[in-house]
Amino acid sequence: MSAGIGTAEDVAAEAARRRTFAVISHPDAGKSTLTEALALHAQAIEQAGAVHGKAGRRGVRSDWMDMERSRGISITSSVLRFEFGDTLLNLLDTPGHADFSEDTYRVLAAVDGAIMLLDSAKGLEAQTLKLFDVCRHRGIPVITFVNKWDRPGREPLELLDEVEQRIGLHPAPLNWPVGIAGDFRGLIDRADGSYTRFRRTPGGATRAAAERVPADRAAAEEGQAWVTANEELALLEEIGAVLDMEAFAAGSCTPVLFGAALPNFGVSALLDTVRRLAPAPSARTDAAGHARPVTAPFSGQVFKVQAGMDRAHRDRLAFIRVCSGRFERGATLTHAPTGRPLATKYAQTVFGRDRSTLDAAYPGDVIGLPNASGLTVGDTLYTKTPVTFPPIPAFAPEHFMVARVKDNSRAKQFRRGIDQLDSEGVVQVLRSDLRGDQAPVLAAVGPLQFDVFTARMADEFGAPVELSRLDYTTARITDKESAETLDGRRGVEVLTRTLDGSYIAVFVDKWRVRAIEREHPDLTLTPMLAAGVPD
Ligand code: G4P
């Protein structure tokens, strides 16, 4: 690939071999284990000790804050890159804790597909449902992996039924387990009927011993488990549970695979499915509704801004998803919101905790730009032909606090910290003339966001804060005219978001919203994207 680097053909070919995706799951379903298993099967490009065996697993997670470590939660995101045959996989990490769903949402704005990971004993759990809603909202195609099949769990047909009934996603199993959960023998590939038998290897964290077994031998050796699996397969044919690629791309059908990440059963089939079925980066629609093809000059969108990711790099890193064109380190990009030029001499890749210099990137890749002050989540960057991508919508906050600086002599640091953490999306910052800038309202999806805010205000900005709770639970997007009607009513307050100046009405409860809506049906009260089950 020496000639033609950066040409439309080069960019199209590089984009076509990329798969940029995330794993969505409930905590404990096995996301870390699966990530390690994927890295083991594929070839992790940046080895650098970032993907450890089970014992060193915490090493994959960032340790930028003691809080994060002590609570065993991962707040920061990173990107893992694997090579699988000719395919290049970018796996974007999402925070594990439900309180940081908003971060997850931003990461999901940067992927082309997702793996929905289910625990075979638990099926669809709360956090998976929420995250799936985000995928649905963004039209992200989802591949389902039913994990922990080596442990007692539920019936496979029952799990499929749950996916269909609860989230309306038509399941199309690509393989089928022989042996019930807990007595896992192997997988039948539905495409060609071939049977792969698994045997546990001592220690688990290595490739499972997988053996292709001809059907007649399998029938003799697996006994009743084989008969049952084949009866179930016949039933699947009868009900037409087959993959419809169009429906998959539209987000209404999900290919389903069974396996167990820990003993490495069925992980290569999952990788192969991601390679074959997950969409490659494609044209992105800009804010004006025009599609920008991947071969257009460079464009990208900031989906995350993270400061102080670890002690060795106490800086501010903007994560940019490449949407079109070839990125070259050193190129000057234009920052769409301000028209200002942006230097990229220090562009990096971010792999687990490790960073290395990035020289070039293609659609689907993620660039880390350190010390890129002035970059906010959602910002577009481009070269040559201008473009602005639609903003990444914010989740509806459900928790509200008033923040005040403890020591008035730190007022300047307080304001700087507030602006910074607002632009990173650590919390949403709302204000009103009545409250003034010395007492902004912080809005969050999960209360842990306030802990991160408080810790960082003290540690990074030297401005310890005092938070006091407000009794609001619900927010709606409103406008100036409606704000005039709402002002002064009991149980409602209208604030403006500092980031974009939009009007947000906050209410003590949903009943108050409904009562006001009934009384004034002409008011603008638009629900925000719900982090949880819709109101
Ligand atoms: P998470 O990132 O989604 O939170 O889950 P994680 O991978 O940490 O897995 C949660 C637990 O489930 C871990 O056990 C892990 O070993 C186990 N697990 C994951 N995949 C499988 C599987 O396919 N089969 C079986 N049997 N177990 C699986 P733990 O005891 O909670 O964690 P640890 O203390 O062993 O690290």
Image (cartoon, helix red, strand yellow):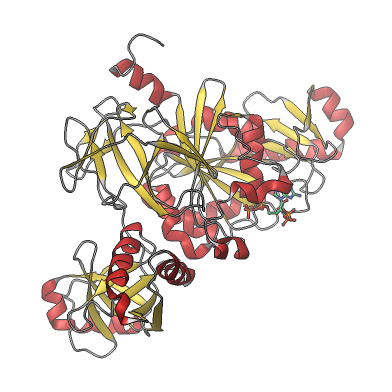
The image shows residue 22, relative to residue 449, as above or below, that is above
Which of the 4 image quadrants contains residue 465? bottom left
The image shows residue 513, relative to residue 275, as above or below, that is below
Q: Where is residue 438 shown, x and y percent of the image? A: 26, 79
Which of the 4 image quadrants contains residue 413? bottom left
**Residue at the bottom extreme of this rendering:** 490
The image shows residue 169, relative to residue 512, as above or below, that is above
Q: Is residue 417 left or right of residue 526?
A: right
> Which residue is found at the position 53% from the left and 28% from the top?
275
The image shows residue 304, relative to residue 173, as above or below, that is below
Residue 196 in view: yes
Which image quadrant: the N terminus?
A: top left
Which image quadrant: the C terminus?
A: bottom left
Using the image as rendered, state which of residue 401 and residue 242 is in the foreground: 401
> Which residue is found at the position 22% from the left and 41% from the top?
286
Q: Is residue 521 left or right of residue 111?
A: left
Using the image as rendered, state which of residue 144 and residue 322 is in the foreground: 322
Q: Is residue 101 left or right of residue 122?
A: left
Residue 148 in view: no
Which of the 4 image quadrants contains residue 328? top left
Q: So how many labels did they put on this image?
A: 0
Q: Where is residue 248 shown, x and y percent of the image? A: 45, 38
Q: Where is residue 25 shown, x and y percent of the image? A: 57, 53
> Which residue is found at the position 79% from the left and 21% from the top?
214
**Residue at the top extreme of this rendering:** 3
Using the image as rendered, state which of residue 333 and residue 118 is in the foreground: 333
Q: Where is residue 296 shown, x and y percent of the image? A: 24, 27
Q: Is residue 438 left or right of residue 231?
A: left
